[in-house]
Image: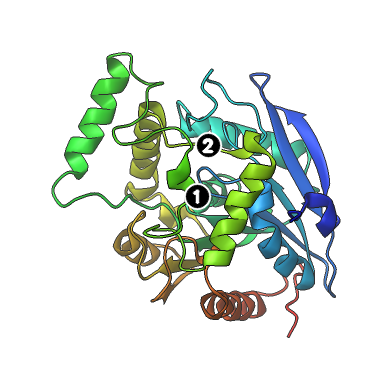
Amino acid sequence: MSVPSIEDRGGVVRWFEAEDGARLRTASFPATGAGDGRLLFFPGFSEFIEKHLETIGDFQKRGFAVWTLDWRGQGLSERSLANRDKGHIGDFDRFLADLDLLLADVVPHGPLTLVGHSMGGHLALRLAHDRPARIARAVLIAPMIDLVLPWGTHGLAQLAAIGLSWAGFEDHYAPGAQDYGPWRETFEGNVLTSDRRRFLETAQQVRANPALGIGGPTVGWTNAAFRSIGEIRSPGYVEGVFAPTLIVAAGLDALVDTGAARALVRRLPRGRFVVIEEALHEILQERDDLRDRFWRTFDAFVDETGGGDGGKTQG
C-alpha cells in the first residue's frame, strides 16, 4: 500500500540553512477552498511533515495556504548526533532562531494563523510572544505547558536533568527513553490516539522512509524543555501574548499537563480553553468524532477572530 506524499497535497518542499549551518526541511501547500488565509503549522516532538498531511488537507479546504517544517533533529531535517534516533536539542532558543529565519526567508510577510501541537504548541506560544506583529491568532493543541510526571517527582526530574547535563550526559537518552523500535508501532496500550488506522498510518510512513523515525528524548532535550517551560510559566510572560489564543486540550492526556494549560489560559489577555474529554494526546490523529469536535471548535474560533489573516472556514 502506498503512503500519502507531500506532493499528493500539492505541496512543495524547500530546504533552508539555519544560522549554525544545519539543513532544515520545510513544505508549503496551497489553499484548495475559498479563502486567502495563511497558516503556519508546528508539529510535536518526534513528528514529521508527512504525519500531518490529513490535517494539512483540512486546513487547505478551509481556505488556508499552509507552511510547516521538520524541526531540527526530527523528520528529514539535520540531526546533530551520530545516533539519529535520539531526539536532541541543547536549548529551545535554537528552535526559535530557526523560526526567525523561516519567517524571514520562507513564509511570505504578513499576519498568520499559528497552529501548534504539543511541543509545537509550546513553541507557537513562544513565537506569539516574541513576534506579535506576525501572529493574527494562535491555536495550541495539547500544548506542552508542562509535562505529566508521577506525583512528587517533578522537582527531582528537573534536578536530575540539570545534574546529568552538567556531568556530561547531555547527549545520552533520558531515563526510560530508547531507540525507535516496535514500541513506536504497537497500537495496544499507546497513549497517543484511540484511532488504530491513523496510528498505523504513521508507522507505515516510517517504514516507507526509515529516515523519518526517531526514538525518545535525550537528557539535553529534557533539560532544555524544563527551562523553556519555566520561561513560559514565569510571571508576566503569557500576559504579553496579545493575539487571540485558543488552547484545545485532551481530556485523557498522559504526556502533557492539561491542568497546567487550564491555569495558564486564565493569564492570557485573549485566551480561551476547550477540553475534548475523550481524546488522548494526539487530538489531530484521533478518531473521526473527536477530530470533528476539534474542527468545530477551530472553525468557530476562526469565525470569531476573522479578518486578521483573511482565513475563512468552509461549512
Return the mark for residue 214: 2
Q: Is residue 284 visible?
A: no
Q: Position of residue 272 (x, y in %)?
A: 46, 72
Above or below for 180 versus 255:
above
The residue positioned farthest toward the left in the image shown: 152
Label annotation for residue 185: 1
Q: Quadrant of residue 100?
A: top right
> What's under tag 2, amino acid-wise?
Ile
In this rendering, position of residue 41 left or right of residue 168: right
Residue at the outermost bottom position: 315
Q: Taking 89 as reference, is 308 above or below it?
A: below
Can see residue 299?
yes
**Residue drawn at point x = 40 percent, y = 57 percent:** 190
Classify residue 198 as left or right of residue 155.
right
Quadrant of the rendering where the N terminus is positioned: bottom right
Image coordinates of residue 202 in percent, x first then y, are: 60, 53
